[in-house]
Amino acid sequence: MKTIVYFSIGILFGITMFKSEAASWFRIYEMFQFKAFHMYGIIGSALFCGVIITYLLKTFRVTSILDGTEIQIADKEKGWKRYLFGGLFFGFGWAISGACPGPMFTTLGAGFFPIIVVIAAATLGTFCYGVLQKYLPH
């Protein structure tokens, strides 16, 4: 049952990403050149919804519909370095590839198979971080 729910949510998310053009390399390129508001509007509305939903989940102690356990959101760790450097690496990868993790899979699902190279590189980068994590300042 959980697999069907997660799969359905993923399909809905992918359709939304594709139809909103958030998976469009051209829209991402426009954003990084500050030529269009489109992507900033998508990111801003996602941020706004995320803040509201997080507040509601924490305030009303909502439980999961799948297993009834309380949804708990851990507080973020303090410090600016991890967010600055993580954001820079993420942003550079996004600018170079024209895709962030959600749209990568949406692009693959839409039939643009060269994105497999980007997905493989992102997976390799994640693996390298896992190996080097204990040596990095957090």
Image (cartoon, rainbow, N blue to C red):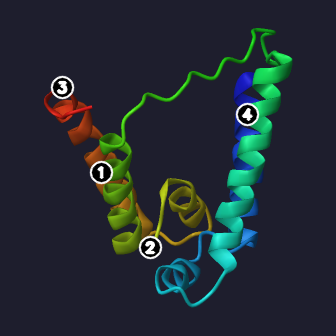
Question: Reading the chain from its start, which is encountered first: label 1 or label 4?
Answer: 4
- Disc 2 marks which residue? 98
Question: Reading the chain from its start, which is encountered first: label 1 or label 3?
Answer: 1
- Disc 4 marks which residue? 54
Which amino acid, mark 1? Phe
User: Residue at (75%, 9%) from the top-left corner?
Assistant: 69
Which amino acid, mark 2? Gly
Q: Which mark is residue 128?
A: none
Question: Reading the chain from its start, which is encountered first: label 3 or label 4?
Answer: 4
For marks 1 and 3, give the CA distance: 16 Å
Out of 116 and 50, give the one closest to the viewer: 50
> Is 84 left or right of 30, judged from the image as shown?
left
> Is 94 left or right of 13, judged from the image as shown?
left
Which amino acid, mark 4? Thr
User: Residue at (54%, 80%) from the top-left corner?
Assistant: 31
Question: Reading the chain from its start, which is encountered first: label 4 or label 2?
Answer: 4
Foreground label between 3 and 4 = 4
Which amino acid, mark 3? Lys
Q: Secondary structure at mark 3?
A: helix
Q: Mark 2, residues whose alpha carbon is within 10 Å: few (<14), some, or many (≥20)? A: many
Contact between labelled residues 3 and 2, with CB atoms less than 8 Å apart: no
Q: Mark 3, residues whose alpha carbon is within 10 Å: few (<14), some, or many (≥20)? A: few
For marks 4 and 2, give the CA distance: 28 Å
Q: Secondary structure at mark 1?
A: helix
- Disc 3 marks which residue? 134
For marks 2 and 3, give the CA distance: 29 Å
